[in-house]
Amino acid sequence: MRFIADLHLHSKYARATSPRMDLQGMAEGAKLKGIDVLATADFTHPLWFKELKNKLKKSEDGSGLYTYRDVRFVVGTEVSNIFSAGGKVRKIHTVLLIPSLEIAEQINDVLGKKGNLKADGRPTFGMPVLELVELVMGFSRENVVIPAHVWTPWFSLFGSMSGFDSVEECFGDQARHIFALETGLSSDPAMNWRLSALDKYALVSNSDAHSPQKMGREANVFDLQKINYKNMMNAIREKDQKRFLYTIEFFPEEGKYHYDGHRACNVCFSPKESISHNNICPECGKRLTIGVMHRVEGLADRPEGAKPPGAIPYKSIVPLLELIAAATKRAVNSVKVRDIYSKLVPKLGNEFAVLLDVPMERIKNATIEPVANAIQKMREGKVRMKPGYDGVFGELVLDEQENIRKTVSKQGRLSDFD
């Protein structure tokens, strides 16, 4: 059975997250998007965990998944570790996936003694991240730890501001438990394929959504005879292209850390431009925030276009609301854009069906011409992005001449957060 899974998002108990990120909002968003399996998010938060225990229905077949309003959930969360190593402050985020609420509760009991779980849906601990991995894996070998958005400058495995240069340097002897890496919004698999050291890891993609609107902007597509936790994790672990079909990706240029820059000064540089300025902002003289592309270039041992054998394929998308907004030259949250979206999606099934599967002839018969043309351009890879930098999302370009619109409005609304 083919299905789509988004395994990293946040609940209403995480900072800067929409109050609609409760189970009802998540389930409604999943059905609208076409997502079949969601992570519960934030299982470490006491109030949210109580809701999960009370409202999720455990699958009777022992699948390790739970259901709420016909949407499947896997127990998951994101954790932040801030610690010193090698004379530098490190800030590493990881995604934890757990086969049952019972095991998650045991983990919570121990983590609650090491930090304040009530402070945020994504808790922060002062212990090295390798200690977190050792702790989590001590409860069950079926638990999974995945380094989150591995290239983000501030909070990731390879981040330019606080990360490491290799998985082994970060996780030490616990690296043996790491078999997958999350690419994050500002990189795609092709960028990661440039590092031969990453060939042994599966590359997964998730939304890290803070609102239902953002769910599924990145996701994973599987084909399993039986949808359950073990089969899903094994398909990732084994990089089985017959079971783990492909990932759904943001165009990485749209991510808000793709290029280098300094947003306070409106300075956006390619890696080459940054190097020519010694990584210093020419406006204020402060150090630039070194983005994902620059960091990949620094660690890569392969040229662009390299693809290792056995790599899981991917497909790049632009979220449908953003395409409609670009095509109609209106804001994402405008009444006109919402109206077109709400009429188009129910006609054709769900958002992913519209973006990836429904024949273009049906789309042309279901919506206005500019929107249909925008969807076709996206499918053909004819959209371009003015790269994002230093916390500023990229800008969507539907053709080479016209910069249609910013893909998001000013930062600050809950729906705009990563």
Image (spheres, helix red, strand yellow):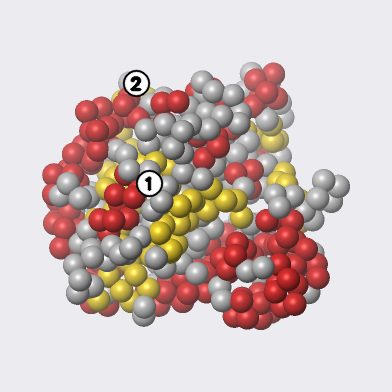
Viewport quadrant of the N terminus: bottom left
Left or right: residue 79 versus residue 293 is: left
Write the residue at 75% across / 67% down.
372
Crowd band around label 1 with a 10 angstrom C-alpha radius: few (<14), some (14–19), many (20+): some
Q: Which one is in front, 412 or 350?
A: 350
Write the residue at 72% across / 78% down.
366
Q: Which one is in front, 304 or 75?
A: 304
- Give the numbered dot on residue 240: 1
x and y, in percent, of residue 403 in the image: 80, 51
Left or right: residue 287 versus residue 76 is: right
Q: Disc 1 or disc 2, which is closer to the eye?
A: 1
x and y, in percent, of residue 262 in the image: 64, 36
Vertical relation: 122 (above or below) 345: above
- Give the numbered dot on residue 178: none
x and y, in percent, of residue 247 in the image: 49, 51
Q: Is mark 1 on a helix, strand or loop?
A: loop
Q: Is mark 2 on a helix, strand or loop?
A: loop
Taking the view exactly as shown, the residue that stands out farthest to the right is 401
Write the residue at 63% across / 57% down.
318
Look at mark 2 in the image and give the residue it sits on: 87
